[in-house]
Image: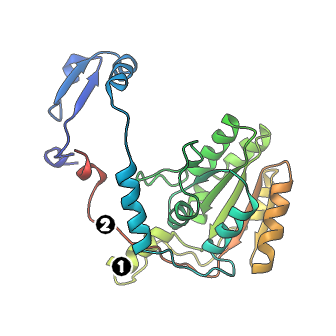
């Protein structure tokens, strides 16, 4: 990308073992020649304890000004997450990237014990299935639930075979709206609802795909099936995949567009 617009407000600390690389592309405010592990350890010791009270209060104001909308009955993402929160106590929640990620963040606020794992701001579709497996390996006594969209799931679904092979039990919930939700929403907003390569006329049978790899596979297409499917998956000691075939592809708001995360770094 254009170097003259790279993080224009940031004071850059450049750490590299090779002096020739320092400030090679972007001028460094503080150049450090050395091993990154040792340098970062010393820098971390110098940092003050972060205080987030003001930021958290602001987020509360935003949440109050923009209440979450969506149907609280039927096979909808808000309803599924509402029911999940009642059935699962203190889970490790992993999300992929998309509209389901936004809903999950509303229903499962981040706690101090690293219970909410997501690819925030990076747009890394396919993150959640392997991340959930890793989380379960790290805290085997916790229930690990992966919230994923149908598009993201297709990118790393093969790792279910790894979970089954290694006997790592995770619960994968697919919010299946037959489209790439965030892409579809952006095309709604900025391209006059002219959709390109983001809506699927036919989708994969995810339950049978999961069964083929040795996991429990379930399909939910009616409100009355949500609780029994979740209870069955949570009661079993095996990796489980539930394909929730959503009755609506609801957009999420507010939207923030037109800037890079690096534009906010100071």
SS of the residue under disc 2? loop
Q: Nearer the viewer, residue 243 or 214?
A: 243
Residue at x-position 37% and y-position 42%: 51
Residue ID for mark 2: 257
In the displayed structure image, the side of residue 37 where residue 9 appears, left or right: left
Circle 2/circle 1 CB separation < 8 Å: yes
Residue 60 placement: quadrant: bottom left
In the displayed structure image, the side of residue 54 where residue 202 appears, left or right: right
Residue neighbourhood size for the residue with mark 1, other residues' Cα within 10 Å, grouped as few (<14), some (14–19), many (≥20): few
Which image quarter is the C terminus in?
Answer: top left
Q: Position of residue 26 (x, y in %)?
A: 17, 35
Q: Is residue 222 visible?
A: no
- Residue 230 vertical position relative to residue 49 in the rendered view, above or below: below
**Numbered circle sitting on residue 231:** none
- Residue 13 vertical position relative to residue 8 in the rendered view, above or below: above
Q: Is residue 54 visible?
A: yes
Residue at x-position 39% and y-position 82%: 194
Q: Earlier in the sequence, mark 2 or mark 1?
A: 1
Q: Position of residue 106 (x, y in %)?
A: 53, 64
Residue neighbourhood size for the residue with mark 2, other residues' Cα within 10 Å, grouped as few (<14), some (14–19), many (≥20): few
Residue ID for mark 1: 189
């Amino acid at each position: 990308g254009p170097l003259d617009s790279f993080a224009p407000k940031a004071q850059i600390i450049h750490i590299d073992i090779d002096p020739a690389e320092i400030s090679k592309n972007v001028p460094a405010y503080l150049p450090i020649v050395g091993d990154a592990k040792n340098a970062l350890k010393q820098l971390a010791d110098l940092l003050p304890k972060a205080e987030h009270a003001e930021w958290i209060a602001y987020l509360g104001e935003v949440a109050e000004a923009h209440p979450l909308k969506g149907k609280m009955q039927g096979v909808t993402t808000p309803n599924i997450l509402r029911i999940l929160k009642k059935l699962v106590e203190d889970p490790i929640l992993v999300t992929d990237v998309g509209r389901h990620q936004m809903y999950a963040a509303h229903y499962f606020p981040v706690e101090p014990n690293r219970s909410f794992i997501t690819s925030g701001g990076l747009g890394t579709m396919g993150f959640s299935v392997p991340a959930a497996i890793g989380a379960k390996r790290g805290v085997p006594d916790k229930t690990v639930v992966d919230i994923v969209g149908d598009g993201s799931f297709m990118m790393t679904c093969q790792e279910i075979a790894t979970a089954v092979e290694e006997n790592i039990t995770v619960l994968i919930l697919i919010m299946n709206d037959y489209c790439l939700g965030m892409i579809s929403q952006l095309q709604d907003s900025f391209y006059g609802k002219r959709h390109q390569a983001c809506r699927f006329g036919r989708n994969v049978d995810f339950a049978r795909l999961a069964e083929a790899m040795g996991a429990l596979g379930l399909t939910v297409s009616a409100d009355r099936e949500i609780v029994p499917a979740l209870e069955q998956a949570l009661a079993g000691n095996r990796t489980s995949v539930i394909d929730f075939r959503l009755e609506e592809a609801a957009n999420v708001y507010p939207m923030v567009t037109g800037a890079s995360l690096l534009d906010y770094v100071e």
